[in-house]
Image (tube, rainbow, N blue to C red):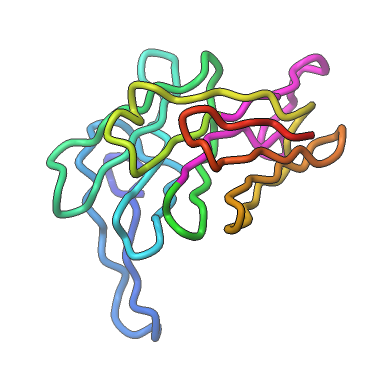
Amino acid sequence: SDQSRRTLPYTVRADGSGKPVPFAVPDTAQVDEIELAPGGAWIVYRRGTVNGNRRLAMFRPGVDSTPTEISTGRFDEYAPTISPDGRFAIAWTDVTRVTRPDVIEGFQQISIIDLEDATAPTRVPVRTVGFRPSSLTFAANPPRAFAVTEDGITVVDLSTPRDPRVLR
């Protein structure tokens, strides 16, 4: 963080030489939990608390001058995760990162963002995957997401991005 107490991302050379350099994210809110798409085409991150709510935002470095807020579910999603091909970002709440969650809070929903769809920030499918997800991963062919929850593993078929299907 800098002296203003904001969390800032930094770029670091892969070989470890040189000093970390602050990476400018054009946002006035605190920037948390940054995910960079492969190749750097998109940055998806959780905005710090603004008016009591956390929301996700995304922007394309070198293309967008301001971030676009992503319309997600009605619950606070904490962690965006981007698929290895950079096509999807999934916002979800990792229960292992929640301090003293209420015993009835399940954090069962994920918001699926198709980064190749120009309307993605305004139309984000929300799916229920099971009680308290703790891990999320992807498979490429066919495109699927796997949510590990206290109930087991839920498979989400992403081959129809505007209408992802929970398979089990």
134 lies left or right of 59: right
Query: For residue 32, which quarter of the picture?
Result: top left
Q: Nearer the viewer, residue 33 or 8?
A: 33
Name the residue at 44% across, 35% down: 113
Name the residue at 63% across, 40% down: 157
Instruction: Give the quarter of the figure containing the C terminus.
Output: top right
Q: Which residues are magenta?
A: 88-110
Q: Is residue 163 magenta?
A: no
Residue 103 at x, y percent in the picture: 82, 18
97 lies left or right of 36: right
Residue 63 at x, y percent in the picture: 14, 49
Residue 119 at x, y percent in the picture: 30, 28
Name the residue at 41% across, 25% down: 55
Q: Nearer the viewer, residue 15 or 74?
A: 74
Q: Nearer the viewer, residue 39 or 19?
A: 39
Name the residue at 51% across, 24% down: 125
